[in-house]
Image (tube, rainbow, N blue to C red):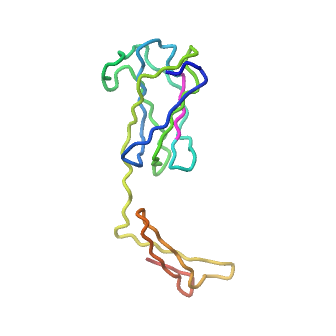
Amino acid sequence: MNFTGDGCGFIVTPQRGLTILSAVRFYTANDFPERDPAAFRLEGSNGNGWILITEQPLSLPPERNAAGQPLNPGLHSQTVQLPTNLMPPAAYQSYRPVFPSPAGSSTMQIGEIERLGKAAFAPTAANVTVSGRILTAEGGLRNARVVLTDSSGNSRTFLTNSFGLLSF
């Protein structure tokens, strides 16, 4: 609950690491509908600032969830699907939902927010070939050092051939 009416939010960092959200479900709190948020903004971060994922209006149902009781999944809530135009979908380590204003009061209250999505598993490089060419204005750059580093910090170094080509 936020009593200031100035907007509020919080940061959540899932313990499982990188996650990809497909939707967010907002549950009503126990008291007045005019305290429901009128809109929300969702941002994601991987440690270098925040990226806007979506900004949408909300229209929570008038029914209220009981205070101090377990929520019935999906009851007295609104599910918002996140944009699907991101290919591949972006995975973030932290999320920040922000509520700019309540619907009709100077106090904003939300019962619960449920993140719907999945863990983002690290891709494998099994049976993958990486190749390319390092160029200058004069042509291929011979003996250029290319370093490939995996998610564990292990590095391998390769040199381009006399035409600037590399393949590993």
| Residue 123, x across and y down, in percent | 38, 59
Residue closest to the eye, 51 or 70: 70
35, 87: nearer the viewer: 35
- Residue 60 image point, x, y percent: 46, 20
Q: Look at the picture and state if 94 lies above or below 62.
A: below
Q: In this view, does 103 lie above or below 19?
A: above
For the point 60% across and 82% down, which residue is it? 141
Is residue 95 or residue 3 the one in the foreground? 3
Q: Which x, y percent locates residue 77?
A: 40, 23
Identify the residue at horizontal 36%, vertical 16% (top origin): 67
* Magenta stretch: includes residue 134: no
Q: In this view, does 109 lie above or below 12?
A: above
**Range of residues picked out in magenta:** 38-43
Q: Is residue 37 left or right of residue 66?
A: right
Q: Quadrant of residue 70?
A: top left
Which quadrant of the figure contains the C terminus?
bottom left
**Left or right, 138 with reference to 112:** right
Main secondary structure of the magenta stretch: strand
- Going by the picture, which residue comes out furthest to the bottom? 162
- The residue at 44%/75% (across/down) is 156
- Please report the residue visible at 50 percent of the width from the left and 24 percent of the height from the top: 58
